[in-house]
Image (tube, rainbow, N blue to C red):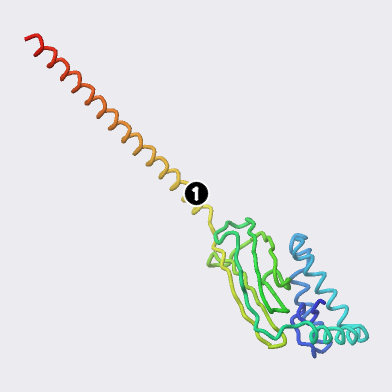
Amino acid sequence: MKDYYYFLGIPQNASAEDIKKAYRKLSLKYHPDKNENDDFFSDRFKEIKEAYETLMDAGRRKLYDRNLSSQQRNVKSILPPKIKNFSASKIRAKAGEEITVYWNTYDADLVKIIPFGLEKPNGERTIRIKEFDSQGKFQILLHATNTVLHKTIVQGITITELAESQSDSFEKETLSNSTNTYQQTQKKETKSQRLVSLIIFLALVAMIIVWLLADF
């Protein structure tokens, strides 16, 4: 069952005015028109709108609260939440590049990943990084919560921007290393060829000397 209060970032005793304020703020942030109709933002906007419409209707909210409380009593674990794995396919990327995030949690009935939003306890999601912060970083945070114990643990992943100049420098360095390796190999081959030629020459000289001595 979806937790509409968590979608809007408000407590269960929030007033109608609190719900309106939260909805206005989040709808501006996640509106598809402001995010190039990205599927991720479209999905989040639909969830926020669904939560708002449900909680602003007194009858629907009362029924929702009753069902939510029942589910919370019957399903939730009494063990502290744990994060078994939280990783990304790469930790250095360029703007516009896609990365995949993987996570696995235990005993957490509420899992939120920033900037994705609410997620299942285990899963993966691919995101395209559009921009980094002023320090060239992109932060992804996993919040795993056990609402029975009111305990949350947080783990983060930092993606570092790989600028075009760094990418070019990396490619040049790789090419330079390859060239140096090739040149060193060529030098080694040249030295080996010279050594072989010298051995052959000495062998011929030795044969000639033996032949001359045999005549005497």
Q: Residue at x 19, y 18 (%)?
A: 204
Query: To which quarter of the image does residue 27 belong?
Result: bottom right
The correct choice, above or below, for 84 with respect to 78 in the image is above
Residue furthest to the right in view is: 59
Q: Quadrant of the N terminus?
A: bottom right
Q: Nearer the viewer, residue 133 or 199?
A: 199
Where's residue 31, x and y in %?
A: 78, 68
Q: Secondary structure at mark 1?
A: helix
Q: Nearer the viewer, residue 64 or 31?
A: 64
Q: Residue at x 80, y 85 (%)?
A: 74
Q: Residue at x 80, y 74 (%)?
A: 48
Left/right placement of residue 195 relative to residue 56 reads left
Q: Amino acid at mark 1?
A: Asp
Q: Quadrant of the C terminus?
A: top left
Where's residue 60, x and y in %?
A: 91, 83
Where's residue 47, x and y in %?
A: 81, 72
The correct choice, above or below, for 162 with respect to 109 in the image is above
The correct choice, above or below, for 166 with respect to 178 in the image is below
Where's residue 126, x and y in %?
A: 68, 60
Residue with the mark numbered 1: 168
Left/right placement of residue 89 relative to residue 165 reads right
Query: To which quarter of the image does residue 63 belong?
Result: bottom right
Q: Nearer the viewer, residue 152 or 164?
A: 152
